[in-house]
Structures are given as structure tokens and as C-alpha cells.
Image (tube, rainbow, N blue to C red):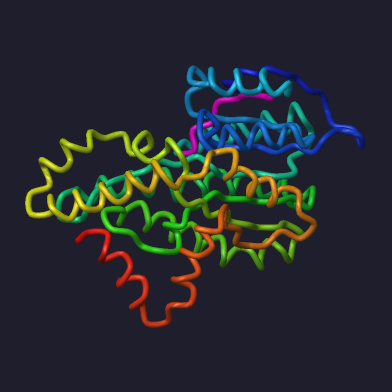
């Protein structure tokens, strides 16, 4: 199995720490959650698509005085997922929790992007979650474990120029909400964690030249500029740190009876609450229309 590891383990014993596998740990919430879980006493298998990008993760672990088992896992590649899960069981003997964190941001609107672009967003943010969850469930059933997925407030409230991203996160939320009672009947707890704005992630995760996007937006240029002005200001002035958002992941890992839906901040609770109480859709559309005008 392709992997790199900063710690090793043989088969588990009754005194062995619980084992959690976290995807997408090269930066942001995934990195912070890996450190927080390790500090809380978990054996953390920290995975990322390219282990060559593990420098920040390893540095953070060293600074925190914790050990991580760092491994390669590409959520879009079923063979990579299967190999990673098999390696975890072979080396640690158990799997007590999975945190589906890997994902990618996306900026665009339907007329200006291809359906292939939308499929690519779904492949990472939705089907990637399913690949990992399906492979992990037999092992989580064996331990009475936990399946935790980092979604977004964008999995509850649709947002301008985020159609594909929000569609993927809506799909994850619907899938996990539907799966939760089925998994619970077999002893597995299912939760979703909904972050709002997290510092440093918006522009980096989208991975595009924002001015070039505006220049190419045609009739959508003015509303796109308005959306970017509003959203960039929010990320610069009101965003959580990844460590703050990771506290909600740790809650899902450690609470005696974790909630199904856990927001990472008061702002996220208020924002998602607007949708959950909005029976006719007018409150959400009244809010988001202001972002593009």
C-alpha cells in the first residue's frame, strides 16, 4: 500500500487508543482536526491525496508534540481508498471513526461552465465521501464507530455562484441524513459538521484567478463582482480559524451522543437556521439576492 508514516503500530489491544481516519489533512480544517484528535488521545491516520504536501501537517504535529500516521488516500480513486482502509486495519487492527473532510471549492454559474465541470465537483465533494464511507462502514460496524462528514453551511443554504459546490454539499447532507437511522440501527453514529467561513480557505480552495473570472463572466460580471466583494470581506473579517472549526469535529468524535447536525459557530447556526425555518423559501432568497446586487 502506498503510504508514508510518522508512527507505526501493531495489532490493537484493549488499551490501544481509538483509531480515526481523517481525509484531506494537508491544510485547513482537516489538518486542525488531525492535531486536535491526536491531542485528545486518538490514534490519527491523517490522509491526503499527495503526501508530498504533508509538510505543514508534520510541522504542526511536531509543534503540538503528537504523532500522526500519515498516509496517501485519493477519495476519487476507489483503489486508493480500498488500499488505505486495508492498510489501517492491517496496521492498527481497528477503525473507530472516519472524518470525511477532503473536498474542493468551486466558483461558477451554469451558463458559463460545462456540465463536465459540475461532474468534477460532484466527484470530489460527493462521490469521494461515498467511496470512503462505503469502505469504512464494515469496520465501523465492528467497533460501534462514528462516521463524520464535514459539509458546509452551503449544504443547507444555496449560494450564488456556488451552484455546483452547494449541490454536492446538499447531496452529502441528504445522503447522510438518510443513512443516519440505518447506520444507527447497526451501532454506527452518523454526523455532519457545517462550517461557515474559515480563514484562508476561500480563495485558496477555489484555485482560480478571481479577476480573470470576472473578466470572462460576460453578462454575469456585475453580480459576480458584487458576490466576490461581499464574500471576500466576510472571509477576511468574520471567518473562524481552522482550529476553531475543528472543535466541532472533535465534539462529533467525543460526545456521548453526538448530534446529527453540528454547526461550527454561532454565525453558522444562525445562517443555517434561516433555511431550516424557511418553509416557502422567501427568507433565503431575500438574503442571498442581496449578495449579487
Which residue is found at the position 54% from the left and 21% from the top?
Answer: 56
Extreme right residue here?
A: 14
Number of dots carrying numbers: 0
Extreme bottom residue here?
A: 280
Question: In the image, 56: left or right of 274?
Answer: right
Q: Nearer the viewer, residue 201 or 55?
A: 201
Question: In the image, 183: left or right of 167?
Answer: right
Which residue is found at the position 75% from the left and 19% from the top?
Answer: 8
Q: Position of residue 95 (x, y in %)?
A: 73, 40
Q: Position of residue 129 (x, y in %)?
A: 51, 47
User: Where 142 falls versus 260 (above or below)?
Assistant: above
Extreme front residue here?
A: 237
Q: Nearer the viewer, residue 288 or 106?
A: 288
Which residue is found at the position 71% from the left and 48% from the top?
Answer: 253
The question of residue 267 being in magenta is answered with: no
Which residue is found at the position 36% from the left and 51% from the top?
Answer: 165
Quarter in which the C terminus is drawn: bottom left
User: Where 173 falls versus 207 (above or below)?
Assistant: below
Q: Position of residue 199 (x, y in %)?
A: 46, 39
Quarter in which the N terminus is drawn: top right
Q: Position of residue 127 (x, y in %)?
A: 45, 48
Quarter location, residue 275? bottom left
User: Where 270 falls versus 28 (above or below)?
Assistant: below
**What is the magenta range?**
67-75
Extreme left residue here?
A: 218
Amino acid at each position: 500500500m502506498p503510504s508514508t508514516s510518522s508512527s507505526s503500530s501493531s495489532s490493537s489491544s484493549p488499551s490501544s487508543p481509538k483509531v480515526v481516519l481523517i481525509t484531506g489533512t494537508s491544510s485547513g480544517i482537516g489538518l486542525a482536526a488531525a492535531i486536535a484528535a491526536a491531542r485528545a488521545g486518538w490514534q490519527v491516520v491523517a490522509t491526503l491525496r499527495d503526501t508530498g504536501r504533508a509538510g505543514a501537517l508534520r510541522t504542526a504535529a511536531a509543534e503540538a508534540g503528537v504523532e500522526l500516521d500519515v498516509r496517501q488516500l485519493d477519495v476519487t480513486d476507489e483503489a486508493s481508498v480500498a488500499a488505505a482502509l486495508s492498510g489501517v486495519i492491517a496496521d492498527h487492527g481497528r477503525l473507530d471513526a472516519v472524518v470525511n473532510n477532503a473536498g474542493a471549492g468551486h466558483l461558477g454559474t451554469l451558463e458559463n461552465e460545462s456540465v463536465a465541470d459540475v461532474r468534477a465537483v460532484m466527484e470530489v465533494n460527493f462521490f469521494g465521501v461515498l467511496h470512503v464511507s462505503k469502505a469504512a462502514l464494515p469496520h465501523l460496524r465492528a467497533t460501534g464507530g462514528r462516521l463524520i462528514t464535514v459539509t458546509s453551511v452551503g449544504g443547507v443554504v444555496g449560494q450564488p455562484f456556488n451552484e455546483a459546490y452547494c449541490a454536492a454539499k446538499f447531496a452529502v447532507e441528504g445522503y447522510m441524513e438518510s443513512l443516519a437511522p440505518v447506520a444507527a440501527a447497526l451501532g454506527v453514529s452518523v454526523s455532519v459538521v457545517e462550517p461557515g467561513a474559515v480563514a484562508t480557505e476561500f480563495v485558496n480552495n477555489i484555485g482560480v484567478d478571481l479577476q480573470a473570472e470576472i473578466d470572462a463572466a460576460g453578462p454575469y460580471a456585475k453580480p459576480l463582482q458584487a458576490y466576490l466583494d461581499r464574500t471576500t470581506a466576510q472571509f477576511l473579517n468574520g471567518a473562524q480559524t481552522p482550529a476553531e472549526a475543528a472543535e466541532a469535529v472533535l465534539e462529533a468524535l467525543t460526545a456521548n451522543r453526538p448530534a446529527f447536525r453540528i454547526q461550527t459557530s454561532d454565525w453558522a447556526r444562525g445562517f443555517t437556521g434561516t433555511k431550516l425555518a424557511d418553509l416557502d423559501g422567501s427568507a433565503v432568497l431575500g438574503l442571498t439576492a442581496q449578495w449579487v446586487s
